[in-house]
Image: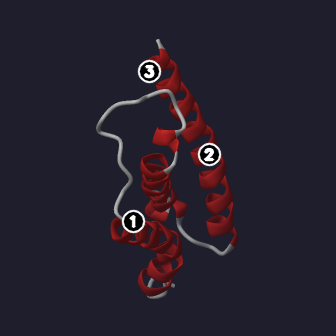
Amino acid sequence: MRVFLESALILVMFVLVSSIWVIFFGSIYLEIGIDIERYGWTPYVSILILFLVLYRNKLQFRGRNKGKDREKLPKLISKILIFTAISLLFLPPVLSFFFNSHEN
């Protein structure tokens, strides 16, 4: 029962945080004129990566799960994943500039 409750809590946290994240960055992308149909997937992937790092480094140690397979991500892997997630957030304006500037 505890595993189910922890899983449900993580799922609810992920849905709430990702909804806020995507709405926030979606509105910024719309404001600066980025095609959401083409590049709107990047905030979703970014939040998945950041949530994976958060879970593996913090959240798995807060619950009641005392399994033997609990270990943090190596620092280098965490930094690479965080850099990738942040890069995905800045990628749509760059791609939109290079690929949409020729359509006008």
Which numbered circle lies on residue 17?
2
Q: Which residue is mark 1?
A: 81
Q: Amino acid at mark 1?
A: Leu
Q: In this orientation, which residue lies closer to the viewer: 40 or 86?
A: 86
Residue 30 locus on image (x, y percent): 65, 66
Is 65 situated left or right of 24 in this image? left
Above/below status of 2 relative to 97: above
Residue at 53 percent of width and 61 percent of height: 36
Mark 3 or mark 2, whichever is nearer to me: 3
Closer to us: mark 3 or mark 1?
Answer: 3
Residue 17: give x, y in percent of width and height.
62, 45
What's the distance in space between the residues labelled 1 and 2, CA to CA? 18 Å
Q: Residues within 10 Å of mark 2 (few under 14, many from 20)?
A: few
- Which is nearer the eye, 16 or 82? 82
- Looking at the picture, does residue 100 appear above or below residue 65? below
So how many labels did they put on this image?
3
Q: How are the residues colored? A: secondary structure
Q: Element under label 1? A: helix
The vertical placement of 18 against 81, above or below, is above
* x 52%, y 76%: residue: 90
Say what amino acid the circle numbered 2 marks: Val
Of discs 1 and 2, which sits in the foreground? Answer: 1
Residue 26 lies, in percent from the top left, at 62, 59
Label of residue 21 in the image: none
Residue lying at the far left of the rendered structure: 69
> Disc 3 vs disc 1: Cβ atoms closer than 8 Å?
no
Find residue 66 and report its horizontal and vertical position in percent.
40, 30
In the rendered image, which residue does mark 3 sit on?
3
| Tag 3: amino acid | Val
